[in-house]
Amino acid sequence: MGETDRIVLGEEETYLPELPEVESVRRSLIANQGAKIKAIELNREDIVRRHDFAIDRLQDKNIREFSRRGKYLILNLGPGYNLIIHLGMSGRFYQLNEDSDITAKHVHAVIWLDNGKKLVYEDPRRFGGLYLIKNRKQFFNRMGVEPLTKEFTPAYLHKITRNRKIAIKSFLLSQNQVCGIGNIYADESLHLAGIRPDRPAGSLTAGEAERLCQAIKKVLQQSIDSQGTTFRDYRNGLNQEGGNQSNLQVYGKDKEQCPNCGEVICKQTIGGRGTHFCEKCQK
DNA sequence: CTGGATTCCTGCTTGC
DNA sequence: TGCAAGCAGGAATCCA
């Protein structure tokens, strides 16, 4: 990436893999379905956050399917064997030709396949990790509804927010009600819906819940269609940048004008997270 | 159960 | 110029 790429991207350049980014990684690696794991190189034992079985058991397993739940990427390796990957703040998961040199500094694991590729996991900040999971359903049993499914409806969102005092933004980030939304798409969804991020979740009317539900779906789908948001570091599994940064309305745009009304976008800390919104068109 | 605070970690930014 | 300090941020964990 050249310097010109950096200049247009703004000051707050961070890689925040959320649902659209993980989905884009998943889609970009689909061609590796059916490949067999020849070997696994683990450079840090503690990057495996949970062992339901020894990592050696993955050898000779076929990757039956790449799937996703929330922000987690799932490699289904047959009954009782799942390699689940979370990218945390700064994680990347991508394929290389098996003979390509790896120059990255924080490569914690490499999965060698029998199709001439290897899958590389790196994560400088190590907020992410690998999970060796026997029972997928159990692993995800506390995770909220997938926002892009028909289960996530305006009525459902309205129902689960009743009597909740937590800020609606924090509610969206919590993962156990609705999953896959992180800081970027929480801010973008609330802006599109015209709702202040610090409103108590329980204060949303049925109409506001409907707007928010539809905004979440639109913002996430739009990003998937653009292959995710690349501020600086994000790449999909084929080392390609996403294009959704050009669709952002408020995230990372404090002190700039709201594209909707021209008011200056403000930034406040809500629930311990940097939050961008427009005080004029979000009520 | 709920909501708030704390913790983990590195790299970038800021300030002197 | 150089170095120390500050800070961001997902989610598990702890506490009241």
Image: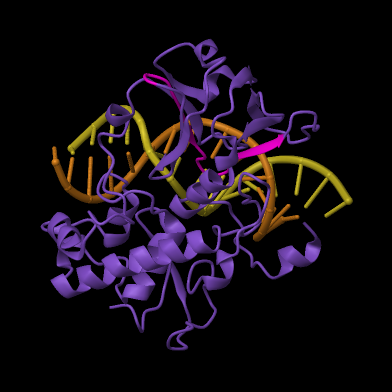
Chain colours: A purple, B orange, C yellow
Name the quarter where the N terminus of chain A is drawn: bottom right
Q: Pick the residue in front: A158 or B7.
A: A158
Residue name at image x 60 percent, y 59 percent? A242
Q: Is residue A1 visible?
A: yes
Front one among A167 and A241: A241
Whether residue A73 is visible? no
Name the quadrant containing residue A149.
bottom left
Q: How many marks?
A: 0
In which quadrant is the C terminus of chain A drawn? bottom left
> Quarter-wise, where is residue A135 in the image?
top left
Q: Residue at x 46, y 51 (%)?
A: A18
At horizontal 47% and vertical 82% (from top left) the residue drawn is: A258
Across and down, in percent, residue A214 comes to: 30, 69
**Residue A183 horizontal side relative to residue A33, left or right:** left
Q: Position of residue A55 (x, y in %)?
A: 52, 14
The location of residue A39, given as percent across then percent down, is 63, 17
A137 shown above or below A46: below
Residue at 63%, 37% in the rendered image: A124
* Residue at the far bottom in the pictured view: A262
- What's drawn in magenta, residue-wise? A79-96
* Residue A257 higher or lower than A178, as above or below: below
Tell me: residue A282, above or below residue A68: below
Q: Position of residue A116 (x, y in %)?
A: 72, 29
Inspect the magenta stretch and tell me whether residue A12 lies in it. Answer: no
Q: Determine which quarter of the picture holds residue A205.
A: bottom left
Taking the magenta stretch, the answer to whether it contains residue A87 is: yes
Is A113 or A48 nearer to us in this picture? A113
- Which residue sits furthest front? A34
Query: Horizontal placement of B12 versus A195: left or right?
Result: right
- Closest to the observer, A248 or A166: A248
